[in-house]
Image (tube, grey):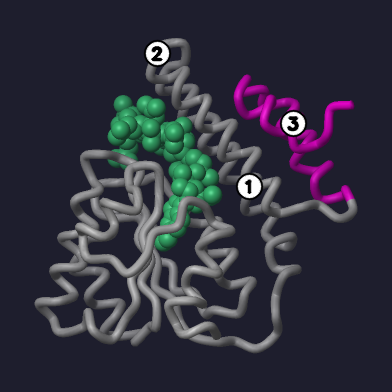
Amino acid sequence: MVNIYQELREAVTKIDTDKLSELKEKVLKTPNIDVDKLVESIRSGLEEVGVKFESGEYYLAELILIGTEVSEAVQKWKPLFEKRETGKKMKKAVIGTVEGDIHDIGKNIVGMMLASSGFEVVDLGNDVTPENFVQAVRKNKPAIVGMSALLSTTRDNIKRTIDALKENRLRENVKIIVGGAAVDEDFAKAAGADGFATNAADAVPLVKDLLGGI
Ligand code: B1M
């Protein structure tokens, strides 16, 4: 039997917006939705869309369409992420997609997961310059800074941001985690980050671990 996660993955991959609209509602009405499986089905569906875009099967207009649809779905499903709420607010996390990069679906999910685990999340949005990260860290004094990068042309802006934090003597006060399709463990280490998360579900235990197991 096809389950809701498979249906969702297929609707994303086929850019079937009618089916996706139906599933946006169905997900909210389905009891005991597994949020991690939900995220994985849209992530893997979008990954396949990316492959089809690269091979010329899909055009930019289709990439924009599915990107918008999935962003809307994720916002609509926000209550599902909030169900994991632990109650008390803990430490602050400043997050953003780095300069030059407007991909924000993954970063938004990471933000919701952190918020649902008790972090106070300051989301700077996308295309965030190193200077804006510096200002936000100075103002909010977070325990965590999280950066997302999906383009190979923008991932070096992670290092530029970390360097800017160092120049402003703010680096030693924060733990920095990075993620997104353009980065991996080795890149994270070379850029000077404290950790890398392959997916949103891994981001939460990673930050808790970096903060001494809170
Ligand atoms: Co673009 N895009 N895109 N795109 N896009 C990619 C990234 C690409 C791989 C597609 C491809 O060609 N195969 C390719 C990059 C190639 C490269 O650099 N090597 C690409 C390109 C080329 C482009 C444009 C240049 C296209 C053009 O204009 N010609 C352009 C660039 C715009 C810009 O940023 N300046 C562009 C534009 C867009 C849209 C705007 C149309 C849209 C984004 C909409 C939006 O985000 N609001 C879009 C989309 C949808 C994609 C793909 C298909 C899907 C991305 C996505 O949302 N995935 C993508 C293909 C791919 O990723 N393979 C592609 C779902 C999301 C849940 O996964 O973001 O990986 P992800 O997040 C995961 C983990 O990575 C992790 O947790 C998340 C959940 O598990 N994670 C973190 C992410 N951030 C984290 C941070 C953390 C921790 C974990 O800590 C802080």
Q: Amino acid at mark 1?
A: Val
The residue identified by callout 1 is 39
Marks 3 and 2, Cα distance to the nearest angstrom?
A: 23 Å
Residue 102 shows up from this direction: yes
Most foreground residue, 104 or 145 = 145
Image quarter of the N terminus: top right
Asked whether disc 1 touches disc 3, contact meaning CB atoms under 8 Å apart, the reply is: no
**Residue 34: percent from the left, percent from the top?**
76, 52
Q: Is residue 11 left or right of residue 121?
A: right
Q: Which residue is mark 3?
A: 6
The vertical placement of 104 against 69, above or below, is: below
Instruction: Look at the numbered disc 1 and say if its residue's Cβ is closer than 8 Å to ligand 1.
Output: yes
Q: Amino acid at mark 2?
A: Ser
Question: Which span of residues is magenta-colored?
Answer: 1-30
The residue depicted at 51 percent of the width and 77 percent of the height is 208
Most frequent secondary structure within the magenta stretch: helix
- Type of residue at label 3? Gln
Mark 1 element type: helix
Residue at image coords 58%, 58%: 201
The reply to whether callout 3 and callout 2 are in contact (CB within 8 Å) is no
Mark found first going from the N terminus, 3 or 2 = 3
The stretch drawn in magenta includes residue 18: yes
Spatial CA distance of label 1 from label 3 is: 12 Å
Q: Which residue does the numbered mark 2 point to in the structure image?
A: 55
Q: Tag 3's secondary structure?
A: helix
